[in-house]
Amino acid sequence: MDIKIIEDQIEGLIKKGKGLREQQRLFDKRSGIVELIEKNKLDMVNLETDLATKKEDLSELKAQKADAVRDTLISMQDKITELLPEGDGIVHLKDDGSFIIGWMLPNKPLVPYEGLSGGQKVVFGQALGNALLGNAKEKFLIYEGGEVDEKNLIALLKQVGERKDDTQIIINTWCKPKDIPKEWHLIELK
């Protein structure tokens, strides 16, 4: 019986050894996971720091881009506004790089170019065309003003007639305006 007890004890120790080796394996595995988690946390902190730096860089680049085009956009807006019978031409660069181009009429919200009526597009389109001419030697604009109403046509004639540059402008319309400023020459085709 002593031998049986010793054999049982040996068998118990072998099972316990197997259990301990399994626990050791799990412990080693957990230790690796813990180390990996700690490494990933450190990597995440580093990535967050890099992300913050990149966001600052991006913000600075956006500011530089805005500064680089500010004078050009203001100049374009001024040139557009010069030829509008009322309100202001707006050219705005958005953060995503796209543009908003439109007409800010008095006491009204900005009307984007695509939202303008047919007559408004004629007037605004030519003002935009004039702005895009920039410092060209020869400037020539033709307005197809058939859709421009009488009030805006007369205002346009006055506004354009007051300009002091050498741009040659022709306005085609189907009706004779009631009030033609002295700066204009009327040619009627019959």
Image (spheres, rainbow, N blue to C red):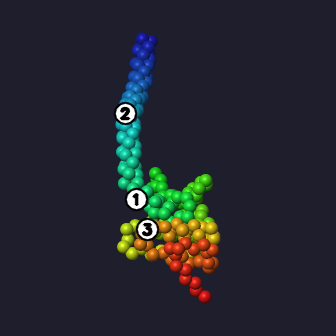
At label 2, the amino acid type is Leu
Mark number for residue 42?
2
**Figure quadrant of the C terminus:** bottom right
Picture residue at 36% right of the left edge, 73% below the top:
137
Picture residue at 38% right of the left edge, 51% below the top:
67
Say which element carries label 3: loop
Mark number for residue 72?
1
Q: Quadrant of residue 34?
A: top left
Mark number for residue 164?
3
Residue 6 lies, in percent from the top left, at 41, 15
At label 1, the amino acid type is Thr
**Above/below status of 143 relative to 108:** below
For residue 91, side relative to residue 58 (left or right): right
* Separation of residues labelled 3 and 1 (CA atoms): 21 Å
Which of 137 and 2 lies nearest the eye of the viewer?
137
Residue 134 lies, in percent from the top left, at 40, 67
The answer to whether one can see residue 186 in this image is yes
**Figure quadrant of the N terminus:** top left
Picture residue at 37% right of the left edge, 37% below the top:
49
* Separation of residues labelled 3 and 2 (CA atoms): 67 Å
The answer to whether one can see residue 29 in this image is no
Circle nearer the N terminus (3, 1): 1
Mark 2 and mark 1 in contact? Answer it, CB < 8 Å: no
Crowdedness of circle 2 by 10 Å Cα count: few (<14), some, many (20+)?
A: few
Picture residue at 49% right of the left edge, 67% below the top:
162
Residue 69 lies, in percent from the top left, at 39, 56
Which of 173 and 50 lies nearest the eye of the viewer?
173
